[in-house]
Structures are given as C-alpha cells and as structure tokens.
Image: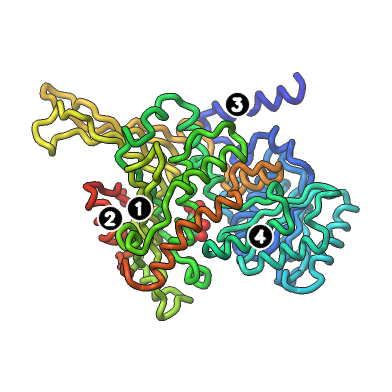
Amino acid sequence: MNEENQIATETETVSTTTAAAPFATLVEPQRAMNAQQCVVVIFGASGDLARRKLVPALYNLASGNGAAGNFKILGVGRTQMTDEEFTNQMRDAVQSAKDTDDFAEDKWRGFAGRLNYMVGDPNDDGVHEELAARLDELKRDGAGTNYLFYLSTPPSVAPSIIKGLSAAGLASETEGWRRIIIEKPFGRDIQSARELNAVVASAFKEHQVFRIDHYLGKETVQNILVFRFGNTIFEPIWNRNYVDFVEITAAETVGVEGRAAYYEEAGALRDMVANHLLQLLTLTAMEPPVAYDAESVREEKVQVLRSIRAMTPEQVAERTVRARYAAGTIDNQTVPAYEAEPGVNENSQIETYAAVEFRIENWRWAGVPFYVRTGKRLARRVTEVVVHFKRTPQALFSRTPKDEIEPNAVVLRIQPDEGIGVHVGAKLPGVEMKTSVVKMDFRYESTFGVRSPAAYETLLLDAIEGDATLFTRADETEAEWRLITPIEEAWAHGDAPPLSTYAAGGEGPEEANKLLAREGKGWRKIAK
Ligand code: BG6
C-alpha cells in the first residue's frame, strides 16, 4: 500500500468511528501535509487572541499526526520578552486553551522549537526592516521564504503595519508567497472600511489578502452550504413560496470579559451583527455558487448583501432594537449590570443586545423577513439559524386554531449541540386524531464521534494553503458596512429606537418580541 492509500484509509476510519477520537487527528492528514513550508508572523503576539486562539490552533495543526504544516512562528509584540519567556507564556496558553485537549510533553517540545519572538512596536520606524532581517535569519536556518502575516492588533495599527511591510519589500512575491490575515473589526463604518481596503490594495493583491471572520471557520457554519447544496430535498422549498421567516440568533452568557475598552467603541451591532450574523444570513440566503471556490462562493454572498436596501432613519426606528443588560442571575451567579463592569464609561450609550429585521429584495426572498439578534448575558449560549416554513393551506387535523399543527421548521444549530433539527407534525399515539410536533435530529457528536476542529485551526490552514473561500472579500466587507452604518448613524442621533434594558440571564428586551409580534411571529426561546 502506498503512502497516499494509507492516509486515505486512516481518514475513513476517523469519519466512521463512533468512539471519541483525539482532537488533533481532525485536520485531514493529507491536507495538512500539503501545507507548504512557511513562517507565520503574528503581530500582537503578546495579546489575548494570540494566547487564547492562534497559538493553540497552530499547536494543534503542528502536532496532529506529527505531519500538519511545516511552519515556524515569529511573534512580534510590544512586550519586552526573550524567545524563552515567550515560549513559556505560550506553553501556559496551549495548556489552558479550551480547544486543545491533548497536551503532551513530546508534542510540546516539537512545537516549542518552532517559536520565535521579536520585540517591536509596529508604529516605530525601522521595525519592519528589523523584521525582514529576522526573517532572513530564519531563512538561513531553513524556514523558507513563504510568509503569512497575521494582524492580531487593534484596527488603528493595521495601516502602519501594512505600509511598513510593503516598504520593507515583504509584500512582494518574487521570492515566495506573501499572505496577510486581517482580524475583525475591519474598519468601524463604510468609510473606514473603504480606507483600509485602499491601504491593503496599495500593498497587496487581493489573492494575498485574508480578512478573517472566525464564524466561517466553524464546521457547522460551513455545513449550511453542504446541507443546502449537497442535498436535493431542501433547495426546492428554500424560498418565499414556502418559507415564512428566518431567525438567526447568537446569544451569549458572557459579559464584556475585561474587553470594555474595545466594546465601548463597538457595541453588539458592530461586534457581532456587522460580521458573524451577516455571514450566517448570506450563507442561508445565497444562490448556489457555480463552483465551491473562493470567487464563486464570495460572489453569491455579496449578491445577497447587495439585495438588501440600506435603511432610512424611519426604518431603523421600526426594524431595529438596541438594549443593554441590567444586573441579574446566570447559572445561579449574580452578575452586575453593564454600566457596573470595569472600564465602562459613566455616560456610555453602548448596546450589548441588538435585533434587526433585514429584507432581502430578490426573486427568492421578497417578502420574507430575516430577523437577527445577538446579546451578551442572555439565558444560554446558543447560536442557531431557524428557517420557519408556512402553515399548511388546510387545517385538516384541528378543530380550533389552537390545535393546529405548528408549521415545519429547520434548525441549523451552530453551537452548542452542533447539528440540524427538522420539526415535523406527527400523530400522537392513541385512538383520537391528536397531533404534535416531533423533531428529527442530527447531532455531530453522536453521529461522527469526534469534536470539530477549532475555527482558527481550519482558517489558519486555509490561509497557509492559499484558499480564501472562508474569508471575506474586499467588496463584501464594504457591503456589510453599507447595511450597518445607517443603523449606527441613526442610533448615534439618539432618537429612535431608544436604548432599552433587559435582565441578565433572561431572553432579552421586550421590544425584540414586539418586533416579531407585529407580524404575528415569535422568537424561539433562548433558555432551555
Ligand atoms: C467575537 C466577538 O468576534 O466573537 C466577541 O468580538 C464574541 O464579543 C465572540 O464573544 C463570540 O464567538 P464564539 O465563537 O464564542 O461564538
């Protein structure tokens, strides 16, 4: 048996096993081996994201079957640290990361040998030349000349890094590939997104640019496309003839988690709706792409965003809700109100909850409202897309409207309990004709027996391989802000809708219920 066959057999075993397999085997070995040798340069390496997500994801990639990705890591940060101190910090990070469940000394030793650190403030003159010299040193040690730059830095720093890389000759692909990953938020409104895109385009070609939205790396988010376009039975009914409305929820139990400085500038709309929730909406609503590749998929997603009209201030008053949490109880713990969180400004008007009704004005979706909502400190952590279908034309089995069978629904559960539920009407056992709703349920964990790789793991590997399908294109980021900026502007003028409150640990503000109730619809409950 040649090596390729052996790998294929191993992969099949992983996908059919029902016992829990170790997490690190989840990235297909073949894919990981194809990943070319490169240096991953992380700007903001002493920051929170690098510690919590990026380095643990790279550890998983590096230690999975010992074959995943032939890369070195060069952290760049403002904190004074030696290579050794950085390595020790990253060891703690990998050991305590939620997504790494197979920390092992031998794997760690192999990984630690890949880590390097350089002290550098991206705003300082000469730092990028210093970086180029350090990369040359790594090249002499056999690290190659392909570079993946990861901007895990505040958005305000991005332009100076991009210009600096370009000036130091590090954006040019004459000696190997050069790619750049840019973290969200990508700007804070349409104007700043355009400006940032222009700076990026002055240094890099679009095929080198990877704007990250980590929701696209979640397996269940990608599965929306497989569910829709890998089956024939759903697509014929996935339109205004059969669908009544769509609701998309991303509820969290956490508060601002020490990120008040960032959150006070962002709020729920910029933090979650402008990116993650609009991405879920486009995947749910898009037309089938001609191929599963970066250009075709992103083209269809942009078309959805273009089909939504930007709201007038009157529409913002009618179709949006903003609120913030008051004190309350979550999991039997008392939690403070938002304004009592450390770092929150006394006069803050920032929302921790947003709900928006979007209307997609195209042939498929005209007349079908898409309601999205997100909030911190809600009753339960749940992210899901629910497609509600219309009632049957005839109420054959009921004498009163109260007895009518609930309409069908498809629930795409992104997290937790990743899976898909289809709700259908069925006859209750017994001599009488009584009906109820039953749920046909597919769960990733029980079906496949493995945990999905962390989003950052998938996305880092994609970037190393140069596959931008799961990253947002320049025009896509601008199309997202085109919808969000008018809402932010109307809210900033302070009139409508007013900022309301909700108790921490609850379902969110009453106004969000009214948003749907006026159309005779309702949200699914967040609490179990
Ligand atoms: C981030 C937001 O992008 O997504 C956070 O900045 C939020 O505020 C997080 O908590 C949610 O991500 P996940 O993967 O936990 O759903």
Do the residues bearing badges 2 and 3 touch, measured as CB atoms within 8 Å?
Answer: no
Residue nearest the viewer, comparing 470 with 190 = 190
Picture disc at residue 13: 3
Of pointers 1 and 3, the one earlier in the residue sequence: 3
Among numbered discs 1 and 4, the one appearing first in the sequence: 4
Q: Amino acid at mark 4?
A: Ala
Along the line of sight, which residue is nearer the eye, 325 or 385? 385
Of labels 1 and 4, the one closer to you: 4
Q: Tell me, for residue 515, which label it has, or none.
A: 2
Mark 1 and mark 4 in contact? Answer it, CB < 8 Å: no
- Work out whether mark 3 precedes mark 4 in sequence or the reverse, and give the earlier one: 3
Q: In the displayed structure, does residue 177 sit left or right of residue 24?
A: right
* Looking at the image, residue 323 lies above or below residue 1: below
Q: Residue furthest left?
A: 399
Per the model, the C-alpha gap separating discs 1 and 3 is 44 Å
Dot 3 amino acid type = Thr
Task: Let me know if residue 43 appears in the view.
Answer: yes
Q: Which residue is mark 1?
A: 357
Q: Residue at x 24, y 33 (%)?
A: 437
| Closer mark to the observer between disc 4 and disc 2 | 4
Cα distance between the residues tagged 3 and 4:
47 Å
Q: What's the residue at 72%, 65% (across, down)? A: 161
